[in-house]
Image (cartoon, grey):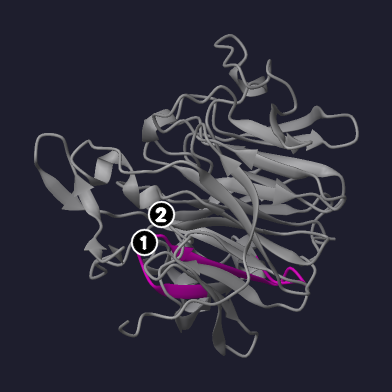
Amino acid sequence: MLPMEEYFGKLELVYSFYGAMPTGVSLSETGRIFICFPKWGDDVRFTVAEIVEGRLQPYPNLETNTINPSNITMSFISVQSVIADGRGTLWVLDTAAPNFSEPIKGGAKLVAVDLNTNTIRKVYTFAEDVVLPTTYLNDVRFDFRVGKSGYAYITDSSSIGPGAIIVVNLENGNAFRRLNGANSTSPDPYFLPKVEGEILMNRNTDGSTSPFRLASDGIAISPDGKMLFFCPLTSRHLYSISTEALRDRTIPDFNLHYHVQYWGEKGASDGLITDAKGNVYAGDYENDSIRKILPNGIMETIAHDPRILWPDTFSIGPDQHLYVIVNQLHRQARFHYGKDMRQKPYSLLRIKIDELPAPTF
């Protein structure tokens, strides 16, 4: 028997998905688990779900998950991210862009769902200069300690337009784009992703190919809310910026990049998350790994496992576990000349980290 690559990190299987492909996971402060399924071609019966007694249930109900063309602001179209904020609200980020289409007008939104009553409490929609025809709303983080009602920070991970961080004042819904098309929110043009030993690129059914490019995707906020970490999906780089600078519109966008801090390479990541001590957790989809980046910049790998086939979104539960959706995104048909290489089930895994999630208030 010849020596083989070593794997480590004690991962537990939490849930197996035999239907549509999930992207997002979030645990509430009481341990409720929420999942989202964007409409990327699978048969998605509901785009937001809760795992209840080992089964997926549409959340908050099936009606909300059914597109109502006459009331698209109150129905979920294609949800990319769900975030429980630690104080009784589940935030739902609706791309309104099934199959990465142009967002349906008026459909892209951030929705606050009250976890006590399981009803929609507030909906934030976006102007056309915020959600562009090329926009793909990807992930969101919150800080309720600034302003009257707090702020949200959303990544635009467009594949053909400018990447950006969208800042939302939750008091009045005013939103604006920051770092629009900046290097830090854009795909790394020199990056060549390699997953499972093969180069990852768009491979179309007609035999044509093109580079895989996605802008700012992963996002995490420091425990004090003062620093935002972010990364483009097709890049190995980690960046941060002061949230105060992001909110300060007297700093013009062309000067804002001077406030961006570069943290170096962390591996190529989809999702990011921070714990209460300020550690950043990042997937490395090229190496089936999960990394932990300490506040001093030191990095360590906490899990390296062949089952980590594209670590997508992270959440830290009240049980001090790090949860991760593993969804084989790189095996989708669009990367393999139209042949779907994914193997069910997709999975929700967790690993004990002995840390609590970063507070938002």
Within-10-Å neighbours for mark 1: few <14, some 14–19, many 20+: many
Is residue 13 depicted above or below 38 in this figure? below
Using the image, determine if residue 334 lies above or below residue 273. Answer: above
Q: Tag 2's secondary structure?
A: loop
Left or right of 239 on screen, residue 76: right
Quadrant housing the N terminus = bottom left
The answer to which of 80 and 355 lies nearer the viewer is 355
Disc 2 crowd, CA 10 A, few/some/many (<14, 14-19, 20+) = many
Q: Amino acid at mark 1?
A: Ser
Q: Residue furthest left?
A: 207
Q: Which label was assigned to residue 163?
A: 2
Q: How many marks?
A: 2
As helix, strand or loop, the secondary structure at mark 1 comes to loop
**223 within the magenta span:** yes
Mark 1 sits on what residue?
186
Which span is picked out in magenta?
221-239
User: Which residue is found at the position 83% from the left and 29% from the top?
Assistant: 118
- Give the quarter of the figure containing the C terminus: bottom right
Q: Is residue 206 visible?
A: yes
Residue type for callout 2: Gly
Viewer-side residue, 303 vs 33: 303
Q: Position of residue 251 (x, y in %)?
A: 55, 67
Residue drawn 65% across the image and 85% down it: 295
> What is the x, y in percent for residue 276?
78, 73
Verify whether residue 111 appears in magenta. Answer: no
Q: Quadrant of residue 306?
A: bottom left
Q: Is residue 361 left or right of residue 92?
A: right
Residue sitting at 24 percent across and 67 percent down?
192
Q: How far separated are the C-alphas under marks 1 and 2?
A: 5 Å
Please say if the residues under marks 1 and 2 sit with CB atoms less than 8 Å apart: yes
Is residue 102 at all visible to an observer of this figure? no
